[in-house]
Amino acid sequence: MKSSSTRQQIIDAADELFYAQGFGETSFADIAKSVSISRGNFYYHFKTKDEILDAVIEKRLSDREDMLRNWDKMSGNPAERIACFVRILIVNQTKIFAYGCPVGTLTMELAKLEHASSGNANRIMGLFRDWLTRQFSELDSDADAEAQALHVLSWSQGVATLAQAFRDEDFVRREVDQILDWVGRVSPSSSLRQPGLAGI
Amino acid sequence: MKSSSTRQQIIDAADELFYAQGFGETSFADIAKSVSISRGNFYYHFKTKDEILDAVIEKRLSDREDMLRNWDKMSGNPAERIACFVRILIVNQTKIFAYGCPVGTLTMELAKLEHASSGNANRIMGLFRDWLTRQFSELDSDADAEAQALHVLSWSQGVATLAQAFRDEDFVRREVDQILDWVGRVSPSSSLRQPGLAGI
DNA sequence: CTAAAAATAGGTCAATTGTCCTAGAGTGAC
DNA sequence: GTCACTCTAGGACAATTGACCTATTTTTAG
């Protein structure tokens, strides 16, 4: 169906633009131009800017859910799955250098605007928190898995923030190694632990 | 002098508003209303919005320089000075819950806008990095002090980000304790590891 | 006191914003 | 073919934006 395609094109373009420029700095005209449609047509699919925002958030949520499900299938080792999460910092390094973390920056921006969809955006952060919590509790059911999850999530957010500010590849690699090492330390059975990385 | 007072009032108001709402979402009218002056008067003191931004960045820089100088005077122990830095997360918790870290959020926003003053804002982050580097090299001149500095800076940025998203006091306290503990571990001579102190 | 300078007020401007509206073009069912 | 429906285009709208301009008022200097 052509309509669903147009709608999806709008969401995809808005997703990119919200990431690259921020929600507040992206106008209807920007998105319409990016999809090469008229503003009139635009308003047929989305009546308000907040509607697009919500659609983008839903898309991001479902994209991340797919990604996490994939990791769940790919590896039976929770430590390896956590490592997949941490390695996003390296895989997406170029974009993070330019625009920061898509989840963190949107969360921040909407929180600052006290935007109605702020809680909605927090659900993405919550998705990661809950998924990481599950991984850590699989590693060690006695540990405070949620605290460990928040630790890794917060760690990666910090690395993304400084990566954007300083664009220092060595820093990112070093921190990723440290996180992986930390994960290995809280899960002695894991094979992630590599010699030489422990000490900073 | 009345003029310098008005100018300073504008800078102070802009500083607050840029922090609470972000630079892009704060208009001339917002600032003028906050200081109770006319827009015309406003343009007498600042010809463009970017001029105010630069003035605000300079103010933030000099405020932080003062703060760091104060800590330098207050304690002869580098580990204790680092602890002062980390404890900002708790001291300013209320504002961080609402608006995030003033330095991190501005850095992010300007980087995303590819704003001309982005590099200028990064100087504040660089100020902390360099100051922390000095503290760590005082602790152990053989260690990679800058890597340690970036580690603590990144850690605190991550905590601020998640604090804003989840507003979880326990999480913040836990992470702060962990950072202080980590600092104590890389500086065996420090007295920070004393039980109970970490929980301040 | 007076004249120059600094400071303030408020109007105006073009551009952009989000939103709404109507007029068509395309498409499928019957 | 006709009719209903989906989709598209583009104009119009009030509000807001950053910016400029010219009058006043206030302050300062001589």
Image: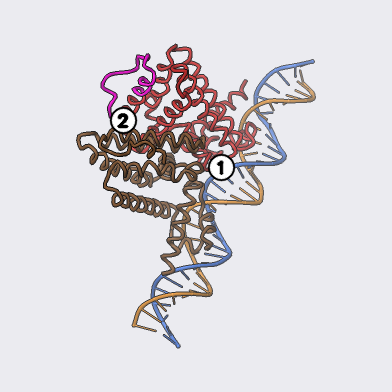
Chain colours: A red, B brown, C blue, D orange
Q: Is residue A96 magenta?
A: no
Secondary structure of residue under mark 1: loop
Residue B25 visible somewhere in the drawing:
yes
Q: CA distance from mark 2 to mark 1?
A: 34 Å
Residue A114 tag number: 1
> Quick one: A38 or A113, which is closer to the camera?
A113
Depicted A98 relative to depicted A85: above or below:
below
Identity, as a three-letter code, of the amino acid under mark 2:
Glu
In front of the other: B54 or A172: A172
Identify whether D24 is placed above or below C29: below
A44 lies left or right of C12? right
Q: Quadrant of the N terminus of chain A?
A: top right
The residue sitting at 32% across, 45% down in the picture is B127
- Taking the image as drawn, is residue A10 in sight? no
Of labels 2 and 1, earlier in sequence is: 1
Residue interval drawn in magenta: A180-200
Q: Residues within 10 Å of mark 2 (few under 14, many from 20)?
A: few
Residue D22 versus residue A100: which sits nearer the camera?
Answer: A100
Residue occupying the far left of the picture: B142
Say which residue label 2 marks.
A169
Q: Position of residue B39 (x, y in %)?
A: 52, 61
Q: Position of residue A197 (x, y in %)?
A: 28, 23
Residue B149 image offset from top left, x and y in percent: 30, 37
Mark 2 or mark 1, whichever is nearer to me = 1
* Chain holding disc 1: A
Q: Is residue B195 left or right of residue B21?
A: left
- Name which residue type carries label 1: Glu
